[in-house]
Amino acid sequence: MRKLLLISVLISSVLLCAAEDSSKYPMTITDSLGRNVTIDVPVERIVVLNSDAAEAVAILGCTDKIVGVSDTVKNKEYYFPQLKNAQLVGTWKEPDYEMIAEIAKKGDTIVPNILVITYTSPGKPYGTEEAAKKLTPFNIKVVGLDLYKPETMRSEILTLGRILDREEEARKYVEWYEKVTDEVEYAVKDKAVPKVYAESTSKGGFYTTHGPGSGVDQLISIARGHNIAGDLKEAYPVVDWEWVVSRNPDIIIKKVSYTDRTPYPFGWERPPSSDSVKLENILNEIISRPGSESINAVKNNRVYLMNWEITAGLDDVVGLAYMAKMLHPEIGLDPESVYREYLQMLGVEYPKNRIFVYPEI
């Protein structure tokens, strides 16, 4: 009799959960482009058009639902080993929308339980508007979430948690993100504000930096630094070196990536190593630019190379901890422990004998 009662209770619970789940749909959310998107049925299949979206889905425990990925996701095997054999749907800059439509099919029809996550990127071929234009006729839902800016990270993760029915996981991540951010802000609150120049790419004597609205600009501000490009008009302005010299930054941070190697390496091997030789060459190139000897950052040996991985995406809070330590070496923060916590949430082991900032702080 007790067994029959238990079975009856279990069946009732399952039916109740199913009823509760079905009551959520249709669900309408507002994405980061301000679009109202209605999700008609539970999402069972996901296409991620960049690695930031893949990280968000992984943090929420839905990696098994990913059926299509961009090239950057494929190349970041250290974060997504389980997606090594996922269907490639083009590059992050040039998605293959025909392939996505093909993936969405089951037989000759498209089952509407598939979701595509893109950057907002208005006017870009990989942005939300273009993706929606190409995929909406196939009844494929497209959501624009940037997932690389501190100011919108919390709201975007909570939105994605709602879409994927992973609201508790989303809340836990946001709580951790806010805890680390609060620890950084407390550690630097009474510190002087150094001038910071952040560089990503260089070509022909011109350099791409990070202006207002960029994720790195926001990280510098939270870490109590003054971004010397913060008063420019563009999010990613191109400047010449004479301009940098005239602004005389106290700290120079260059984002470095080795995207010429695939799959991408996970950080750099600790010195002495072939990685450290390459990094030293990059440092020497910076400090040998015309007029560099007059810059405070060069005179005081405060030129750093920062691994590109931790400067944008869900792990940008790791980059924030490292950046706060670069700007204020005397504070008691331990960026490595922050990274370990993040990787634990992602289900990835912290790599041995690897570094993410050079020279080490």
Image (cartoon, rainbow, N blue to C red):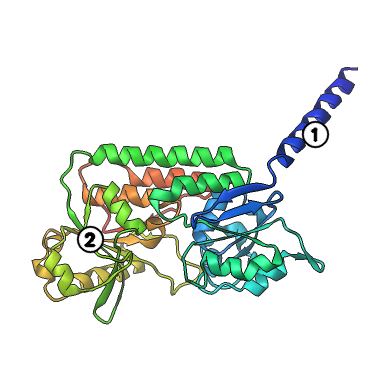
Q: Looking at the image, which residue is at 70% across and 48% down?
A: 42
Q: In the rendering, at what x and y percent does residue 240 appear?
A: 21, 75
- Crowding around mark 2 (Cα neighbors within 10 Å: few <14, some 14 to 19, many 20+) is few
The quadrant of the picture occupied by the N terminus is top right
Q: In the rendering, at what x and y percent does residue 32 appear?
A: 49, 55
The answer to whether residue 337 shows anywhere in this view is: yes
Which of the two labelled residues, at mark 2 and mark 1, occupies the earlier sequence position?
Answer: 1
For marks 2 and 1, give the one nearer the viewer: 2
Q: In the rendering, at what x and y percent does residue 27 appear?
A: 65, 46
The answer to whether residue 288 shows anywhere in this view is: no
Q: In the rendering, at what x and y percent does residue 124 appear?
A: 48, 71
Above or below 269: residue 134: below
Q: Which residue carries the number 1 mark?
A: 15
Three-letter code for the amino acid on which mark 1 is drawn:
Leu
Q: Which residue is most to the bottom?
A: 204
Above or below 148: residue 137: below
Q: Looking at the image, which residue is at 33% across and 49% down?
A: 320
Three-letter code for the amino acid on which mark 2 is drawn:
Asp
Above or below 279: residue 354: above
Residue 282 is left or right of residue 79, and the answer is: left
In terms of secondary structure, where does tag 1 sit?
helix
In terms of secondary structure, where does tag 2 sit?
loop
Number of the label disc, if any, that sits on residue 6:
none
Residue 27 is left or right of residue 197, and the answer is: right
